[in-house]
Image (spheres, coloured by chain):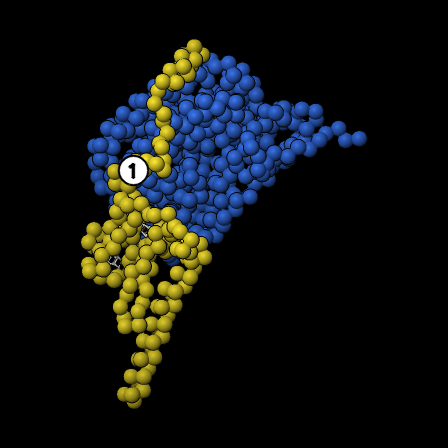
Chain colours: A blue, B yellow
C-alpha cells in the first residue's frame, strides 16, 4: 500500500498570493517530494516584444512584466539595447539608474519581509512594514512621477532629473526608514513568534545551494557568495559602498536577516549616490538600429535577472529572452521543501519571495 | 520584545496611516504623470507622437478632405511621456498634464472598443490613401 499522500498547494490558495501550483508528496506531516507548475499567467511578452513593438518601445513593454521589479526589467533591456547600439551613457545617467534600482530593492525586500511576518501569524507587523514601505515608495513616486510603473529609463538615458526637493525628501525618508529597519532587525531577532518559528525551518545547505544553482538572497543566506552586482561592471557598485551580506544558516531566519541587512546597505548606497551625483546630461542620443546579440545580467531584488536580446539591424528585434530570478531558483526552492513539515510550506514559500508574473510572463 | 510591546501600546494613540479614500482624494506627487493634452493650433501633424507611443493610444484619424484629427485614448495610455519626448513642439502642441484620467464607464466601451477604435483610424487612412491613388490615376487618364 502507498504510504504517502499527495497534497496540492495552489494555484489559488489563501496563504499564497501567487499563481503557482505545488504538488507535495507527504508522508504523515513531512514533505518527501515536490512537483512545481508555473505558467498560469503566461502573457506572451517575449513574442509581443518581437512582433508588435519597435525596439525603442520594448523597454516600456518589459517594464510591465513585473510590478515590483519594473525598473530592473526596463533597465536590463535598455542596457542590452544600448550595448547593441554601441552606446555608453554618461556617469550621471548611470548613477540615477542605479539609484532607482536600489530603491526598488528596498521596497521589494520590505514586501517580502511583510509577507513572511504575515505567514508567522503576525498580521500587525505585516501592516506596519507595509506602512513603512510607503516611505520609499514616496521617494520613487517623487522621482519618477508614478507609483509603480516608473517608466523612468529610456534608451539613451533617464526621463527625469533629480531636483533639490527630491534630494531633501530622499534624505528625510531614508533617515526615518533606517531607524525603522533597525527596529525591525531587533524584532526579527528577538520576537518570540518570529524567531522561534523561523529558526532552522526551510534550510538550504551550502552544498545544496551550489548544486541547485541558488541565487539572490536565497543563496546568500546559505553562505554562497553570489551577487551579480559584483560580477558585472555596468554600475560602480564597489565605489558606492556595496557590501555582500552573507549568512550561514540557510533557513527562513537567515533569509530575513540577509534581506534586512541588504536594505541597510541599499540605504547607504542611495545616500552615497545622491551625495556624489556627477554632473551631465540626463538624456543622450543613441543612434542606429540594434544589430547583433547581447546578454545582460542584473541583480534584481530576488536574484539574477538575465536578458538576451538579438537584433538584425531593423526596428523590430529578432529575439528577446527573459530569464527571471524565480524561474532560475525553482530547483533550489524545491530542494528546501523536502524534509520540511507541510504546515511550514506557506512560510517557506513566502521567504523565497517568488514572483510568478515575472516567471510566466 | 519589550520595545515592540511598548510600541504596540503607543500605536493605540497614534494617528491612522491610511488615507480616507475615496472620501478624500489621494495626494499626488508634484509633477505627477497624468493625461496627455493636445493643442491642434500648434501641431504640425508630423505623426511623431503616434509612432513613439508604445500602446498606440494616440491615433490620427484621416478625414476625406485631408484634415487630420488627433485622437487619444486615455485608458490605453500608460502615461510614459514618450509622445511628448518625440514631439518637435513639446509644451505647445503636446504636453503631459498632472490631471488624472476619470474612471472609464460602460458607455466608453473601453474593452472591445479599443480594437474598433484602432480599426477605425487605420481604415480612415487606408480609405484616404485609396482615394488619393484613385484621384491620381484619374488625373493621369485625363492627361493621356
Ligand atoms: S504618454 Fe505614452 S502611452 Fe500615453 S499617449 Fe504618450 S506615448 Fe502613448
Ligand atoms: S508629435 Fe507633436 S507636432 Fe507632431 S503630430 Fe504629434 S502633437 Fe503634432
Q: Which of B130 and A227 is in front in this view?
A: B130
Determine the residue positioned at 43% across, 13% down: B5
Determine the residue positioned at 59% across, 31% down: A334
Q: How many marks?
A: 1
Q: Pinpoint residue A259: horizontal percent, then vertical percent.
A: 44, 25
Residue labelled with disc 1:
B28
Q: In which quarter of the image is ligand 2?
A: bottom left
The answer, for residue A326, to whether it is visible in the render is no
Q: Is residue B78 above or below residue A260?
A: below
Q: Pinpoint residue A200: horizontal percent, then vertical percent.
A: 56, 18
Q: Please tell me how crowded label 1 is: few (under 14), some (14-19), or many (20+) other residues with Cα within 10 Å.
A: some
Q: Pinpoint residue A197: horizontal percent, then vertical percent.
A: 55, 18
Q: In this view, does A44 lie to the left or right of B11?
A: right
- Residue at the front extreme, as displayed: B23
Q: Pinpoint residue B17: horizontal percent, then vertical percent.
A: 36, 26
Q: Which chain carries label 1?
A: B
Q: In which quarter of the image is the N terminus of chain A?
A: top right
Determine the residue positioned at 50% across, 48% down: A43
Tell me: is circle 1 under 8 Å from ligand 1: no
Q: Is residue A234 left or right of residue A50?
A: left
Determine the residue positioned at 48% across, 52% down: A47
The answer, for residue A299, to whether it is visible in the render is yes
Q: Is residue A171 above or below residue B44?
A: above
Q: Nearer the viewer, residue B20 or A49?
A: B20
Q: In this view, does B68 lie above or below A187?
A: below
- Residue at the bottom extreme, as displayed: B144
Q: Which quadrant of the view contains residue A93? A: top left
Q: In this view, does B13 lie above or below A328?
A: above
- Residue at the top extreme, as displayed: B2
Q: What element carries label 1?
A: loop
Amino acid at each position: 500500500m502507498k504510504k504517502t499522500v499527495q497534497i496540492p498547494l495552489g494555484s489559488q490558495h489563501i496563504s499564497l498570493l501567487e499563481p503557482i501550483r505545488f504538488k507535495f508528496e507527504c508522508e504523515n506531516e513531512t514533505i518527501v517530494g515536490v512537483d512545481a507548475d508555473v505558467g498560469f499567467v503566461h502573457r506572451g511578452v517575449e513574442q509581443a516584444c518581437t512582433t508588435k513593438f519597435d525596439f525603442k518601445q520594448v523597454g516600456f513593454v518589459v517594464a510591465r512584466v513585473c510590478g515590483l521589479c519594473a525598473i530592473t526589467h526596463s533597465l536590463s533591456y535598455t542596457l542590452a539595447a544600448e550595448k547593441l547600439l554601441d552606446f555608453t551613457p554618461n556617469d550621471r545617467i548611470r548613477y540615477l539608474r542605479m539609484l532607482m534600482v536600489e530603491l526598488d530593492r528596498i521596497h521589494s525586500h520590505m514586501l517580502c519581509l511583510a509577507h513572511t511576518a504575515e505567514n508567522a501569524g503576525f498580521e500587525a507587523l505585516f501592516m506596519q512594514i507595509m506602512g513603512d514601505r510607503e516611505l520609499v515608495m514616496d521617494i520613487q513616486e517623487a522621482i519618477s512621477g508614478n507609483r509603480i510603473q516608473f517608466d523612468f529609463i529610456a534608451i539613451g538615458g533617464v526621463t527625469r532629473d533629480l531636483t533639490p526637493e527630491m534630494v531633501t525628501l530622499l534624505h528625510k525618508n531614508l533617515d526615518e526608514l533606517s531607524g525603522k529597519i533597525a527596529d525591525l532587525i531587533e524584532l526579527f531577532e528577538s520576537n518570540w513568534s518570529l524567531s522561534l518559528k523561523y529558526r532552522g525551518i526551510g534550510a538550504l545547505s551550502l552544498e545544496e545551494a551550489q548544486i541547485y544553482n541558488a541565487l539572490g538572497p536565497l543563496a546568500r543566506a546559505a553562505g554562497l557568495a553570489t551577487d551579480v552586482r559584483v560580477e558585472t561592471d555596468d554600475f560602480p557598485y564597489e565605489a558606492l559602498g556595496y557590501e555582500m551580506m552573507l549568512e550561514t544558516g540557510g533557513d527562513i531566519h537567515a533569509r530575513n536577516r540577509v534581506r534586512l541587512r541588504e536594505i541597510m546597505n541599499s540605504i547607504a548606497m542611495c545616500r552615497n549616490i545622491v551625495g556624489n551625483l556627477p554632473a551631465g546630461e540626463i538624456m543622450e542620443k543613441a543612434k542606429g538600429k540594434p544589430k547583433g546579440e547581447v546578454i545582460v545580467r542584473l541583480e534584481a531584488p530576488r536574484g539574477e535577472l538575465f536578458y538576451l536580446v538579438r537584433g538584425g539591424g531593423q526596428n523590430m528585434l529578432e529575439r528577446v529572452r527573459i530569464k527571471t530570478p524565480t524561474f532560475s531558483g525553482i530547483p533550489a526552492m524545491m530542494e528546501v521543501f523536502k524534509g520540511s513539515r507541510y504546515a511550514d510550506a506557506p512560510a517557506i514559500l513566502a521567504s523565497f519571495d517568488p514572483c510568478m508574473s515575472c516567471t510566466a510572463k | 520584545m519589550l520595545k515592540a510591546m511598548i510600541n504596540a501600546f503607543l500605536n493605540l494613540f497614534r494617528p491612522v496611516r491610511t488615507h480616507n479614500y475615496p472620501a478624500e482624494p489621494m495626494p499626488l506627487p508634484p509633477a505627477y504623470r497624468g493625461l496627455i493634452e493636445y493643442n491642434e493650433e500648434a501641431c504640425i501633424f508630423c505623426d511623431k507622437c503616434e509612432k513613439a507611443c508604445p500602446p498606440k493610444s494616440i491615433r490620427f484619424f484621416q478625414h476625406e478632405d485631408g484634415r487630420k484629427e488627433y485622437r487619444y485614448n486615455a485608458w490605453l495610455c500608460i502615461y510614459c511621456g514618450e509622445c511628448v519626448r518625440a514631439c518637435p513642439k513639446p509644451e505647445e502642441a503636446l504636453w503631459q498634464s498632472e490631471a488624472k484620467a476619470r474612471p472609464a464607464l460602460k458607455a466608453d466601451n473601453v474593452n472591445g472598443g479599443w480594437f474598433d477604435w484602432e480599426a477605425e483610424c487605420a481604415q480612415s487612412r487606408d480609405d484616404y490613401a485609396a482615394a488619393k491613388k484613385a484621384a491620381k490615376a484619374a488625373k493621369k487618364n485625363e492627361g493621356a
